Image (cartoon, rainbow, N blue to C red):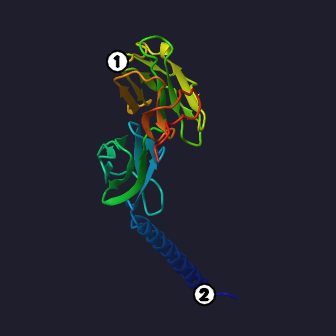
Amino acid sequence: MTTLPEARRARARATQVASTLVLFGAAVLATACDYNASETPRLVTTVSLDVADTTIEVGQATEVTAIALDQYGDSIASSPASYASSAPEIAAVSPTLGTILAISAGTARIDATIESKSAHLTLTVVQAAIRINEIRPNGDIPGGWVELFNPTATAVDMSGWTITSGDVSHGFEFPSGASIPASGYLVIAEQILPLGLKAVDAVHLFSRFGVQADSYSWTANPLTSFGRCPDGTGAFVTTAAATRKATNVCPAVDP
């Protein structure tokens, strides 16, 4: 049988235990709050670069974008990036916008820096592939033509390219869908050129980016044609016979 004093003592012990549990819970909660408050801050740790194509053509523009990443690999707000090119004579880059302009054939390293963290990529600049391969001026009378050659292993889209005679202010722009097959030819009749071809004249070929890809001028009309020997890569010579959409007939070389 429990007496009154014992019951009072039991209630006191229960109250003390409950108070202890409350204090313990409060201490645990306070510790958790302190942990959250001291959590490691996010910092710019690495830089990621994005560009549409790492191989572009002379005269072409593209843009590189730098993204700051934290220690967890997630993007993070940061100061603006700064950009630089190892070879601005090949590929010039805007230091604040990341816009790249291809100047000449070669390779260049493009660097981007955000809050002392840097990344880079290698950009390759190539010349336009299409070449003037053969020209038949035909004197000052109609009937002349210009032959273009594609020396690559893939078809080349000619949309936006321009061909002119000696006066580059008057030319013919190739329409959408025009192309030259791999290792193939395309012939342009002189009637397509606004000023035709004269006995003393020139032909200029411009890429879609407005850069002159090839040209040739002459001061006397040939009996045959002017052609590269070998096709696409050699120097222009007076051919042994005019060919149209076929391999040039090169003159015999004296032994």
- Label 2–label 1 contact, CB within 8 A: no
Measuring from the top left, give residue 101's x and y in whole percent. Answer: 36, 40
Looking at the rendered image, the quarter that the N terminus falls into is bottom right
- Going by the numbered disc 1, the residue's amino acid type is Ser
- In depth, the one of 110 and 81 nearer the eye is 110
Q: Amino acid at mark 2?
A: Glu
Q: Quadrant of residue 220?
A: top left
In the picture, the disc for residue 6 is 2
Q: Which mark is residue 169?
A: 1
Residue at the far right in the pictured view: 1
Q: Which mark is residue 31?
A: none
Q: Residues within 10 Å of mark 1 (few under 14, many from 20)?
A: few
Looking at the rendered structure, the secondary structure element under dot 2 is helix
Q: Residue at x 42, y 35 (%)?
A: 236
Residue 136 location, x and y as percent? 48, 22
Drawn side of residue 216 relative to residue 143, left or right: left
Q: Nearer the viewer, mark 2 or mark 1?
A: 1
